[in-house]
Image (spheres, helix red, strand yellow):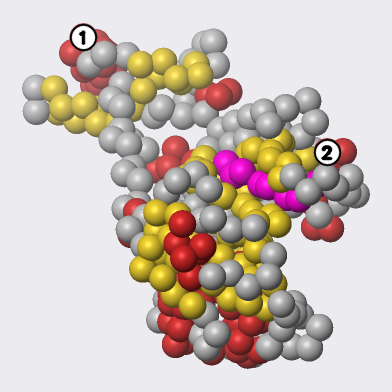
Amino acid sequence: MTAQQQDEDFGRELRELADAVVPRIDVRTARVVPAARRRRARRRAATGVGALTAVVVAAGWTVQAQPWAPGPEQTAVLQVASSPTPSPPTEAGWPDAPYWYVRSEIASTSSSGDLDVVVSEHWYGHTEPGLWFEDGDTSAPTASGPAAWGRFMVDGADTLIGWDELYELPTDPDRLEQILRDSVEEGRSVGTPDDKVAEMALELLDASPAPPALRDAAWHVITGLPGTTVLEEATDAAGRTGVGATRTVEGTTYRLVYDADEHRLLERANVAGAAMVQDVVTGDLDVTSRKTYLEERPASAPPIEPTLEMAGCARWENC
């Protein structure tokens, strides 16, 4: 027997031994990376697959499997399942999530004076288009481009605050406030410079995947501004309690409820006229409009693929 034949026989015996002791797990490669997944997810998936090596130890020998190599039926075989990558802790936020899901209750005053209420479900895209619909009606969805939460002057540059930029902003309240003050300009929002700073800080809390430390910093900016009234406890329309804050801008008061434990905004309500402190605490307000954030979490993808037709745009960059 030649040396080459000996090597082939040995390799065959070793593969048979590995097959005998290791369970086979079929993975259909066609569904590993879904269509319309954001670019970063695709890069991460490609890198993970390229680097994955399944190792089997048998009789002191190591066998390396190549799970990316398709079989006769275009099915890749993983001989050892890799350990899942743990999700980042809540304190770190959600820097790599592809979408941010928000379910909110939106109320506005109708022509009859009553509050019309709808429930909105929104998937904010990290780098891919987003989608939303109201009251569970998936027959009429609306789409938009990747989400953004304001435009600020950062290090002297006019910067659109997308998902990644949320994780680059300072979490020190004083440094964050300075960025917001540098971004104040005439024609932007209404009210005094302090009112505009408060409004920009609120943008960072509005249905945002910002890390908890940035949310707390934005809340600290709002509550530390002259003209903001802070209450230790306030109740939102869903009956949840949190810290309350109000500001009156050009004759109209808005009331915020913030959950300091969960690090998230629970509600913004606009009130007709100036609100009394007790009314703010109990929620007994003449509300003209409100947005109550019922649920927020990272999500993998919207249930329907967003299209330009849904958005009414020619290009996602313009939506």
Closest to the observer, 145 or 180: 180
Q: Quadrant of the C terminus?
A: bottom right
Picture quadrant of residue 312: top right
Query: Up-down: is 30 above or below 134?
Result: above
The secondary structure type at the circle numbered 2 is helix
Quadrant (top left, top right, bottom left, bottom right) of the N terminus: top left
Report which residue position mark 2 lands on. 310
Q: Residue at x 23, y 16 (%)?
A: 22
- Residue 313 lies, with reference to residue 1, above or below; the image says below
From which residue to which does the magenta span run?
103-110
The majority secondary structure of the magenta stretch comes to strand
Q: Position of residue 107 (x, y in %)?
A: 68, 47
Queried whether the magenta region covers residue 107, the answer comes back as: yes
Q: Of the two numbered discs 1 and 2 on the same chain, state the one appearing first in sequence.
A: 1
Identify which amino acid the numbered label 2 is placed on: Met
Question: In the displayed structure, does residue 117 sit left or right of residue 21?
Answer: right
Residue 249 screen position, x and y as percent: 68, 78
Q: Residue shown at 78%/25% (left/top)?
A: 139
Q: Is residue 152 visible?
A: no
| Mark 1 touches mark 2? (CB < 8 Å) | no
The amino acid sitting under disc 1 is Ala
- Determine the CA span between mark 1 and mark 2: 53 Å
Q: Which residue matches tag 1?
A: 20
